[in-house]
Image (cartoon, rainbow, N blue to C red):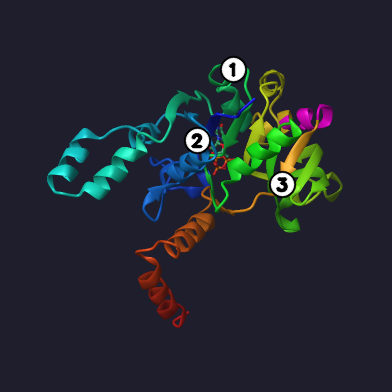
Amino acid sequence: MKVTKAVIPAAGLGTRVLPATKSMPKEMLPIVDKPAIQYIVEEAVNSGITDILIITNRGKGIIEDHFDRSPELEERLLASGKKDVYDEVVSISKLANIYFIRQKETKGLGHAVNCAKSFVGNEPFAVLYGDDVIIGEDPACAQLIRAYEKYGKSVVGIKAVPESDISKYSSLKVDKLEDNIYSCTDMIEKPKTKEEVLSLYSILGRCVLTPDIFDILDNTPPGAGGEIQLTDAMKTLAQTVGMTGVDYTGKRYDMGNKFGILQATVEVALKNPLLAEPFKAYLKDLVTTL
Ligand code: UTP
């Protein structure tokens, strides 16, 4: 079955980016000239996704506004002859069929994904974490969808993380199938001891799930941090029917922490046709003072 639906969980509290995220959702933090979540929606659309459910919560209404029309602004842009900006602003509202639902309590990523049950129905669907922006020629979500189409199992986007950091992430048991594709038969969220570490491969930012995940989520008790962990539910899938892991190409920026936001800003600016040259000159000058 073709993957045409995606879910973007964006209902986290973003405590690692406070105070910026006190009233501003981290998903709306800009990378140069677009909010993080627009890059993620564009990646989904470029991967063949037509219907997107964004999971929000109280205080995240500006995400809805961003993907809506903006008649007053549009009129002003047209009147002042700024047709290019007008076209760009209008195009945001036409990217895909975008739906919203609120996660009423912040009970974890697994709980957030479970809020998508009636939107998803009985189809495979992609999950794009709302604070993970991945930039590359071949959209990461499309790479996972291709692996789903080839192997028929749920897919996780994976990356190797430094050994010193693995206790903050998930750890996966993987065996190589081809090039950057692995079979995944077990996983653990935030391993506490060295013995619990299955590999340095961790799930980062993207997955494609079959709808049987919802029954599993219904029966998943709170795990690490007292939250319902998506990893705990995916572990059941991995151990029973198995999953596929794709070490995707593309650069991932973690918009959930301050360093990741800085990296995204600098690197995306250096690729921007209008900003690249003056920004490079500025940086070169700046580093001589460091
Ligand atoms: P994080 O693990 O980064 O949690 O969520 P967080 O609460 O946003 O951030 P910190 O740790 O307080 O700084 C990963 C993704 O899952 C979403 C977040 O919005 C983010 O996209 N999420 C997390 C939810 O939608 N609901 C939740 O209950 C938790």
Q: Quadrant of residue 174?
A: top right
Gap between marks 2 and 3 measured at Cα: 20 Å
Q: Which residue is mark 3?
A: 202
- The kind of residue on which mark 2 rests is Ala
In this rendering, the answer to whether 265 lies above or below 119 is below
Ligand 1 within 8 Å of the CB at mark 1: no
In this rendering, the answer to whether 231 lies above or below 166 is above
- The kind of residue on which mark 1 rests is Gly
Q: Nearer the viewer, residue 266 or 188?
A: 266
Q: Quadrant of the N terminus?
A: top right
- Residue 261 lies, in percent from the top left, at 49, 55
Q: SS class of the residue under badge 2? A: loop
Q: Residue 36 — which label? A: none
Q: Which residue is mark 2?
A: 10
In the displayed structure, does residue 23 sit left or right of residue 71? right
Disc 2 crowd rating (10 Å Cα; few below 14, some 14-19, many 20+) is: many
Q: Which residue is mark 1?
A: 121
State which region is magenta: 234-241
Ligand 1 within 8 Å of the CB at mark 2: yes
Disc 1 crowd rating (10 Å Cα; few below 14, some 14-19, many 20+) is: few
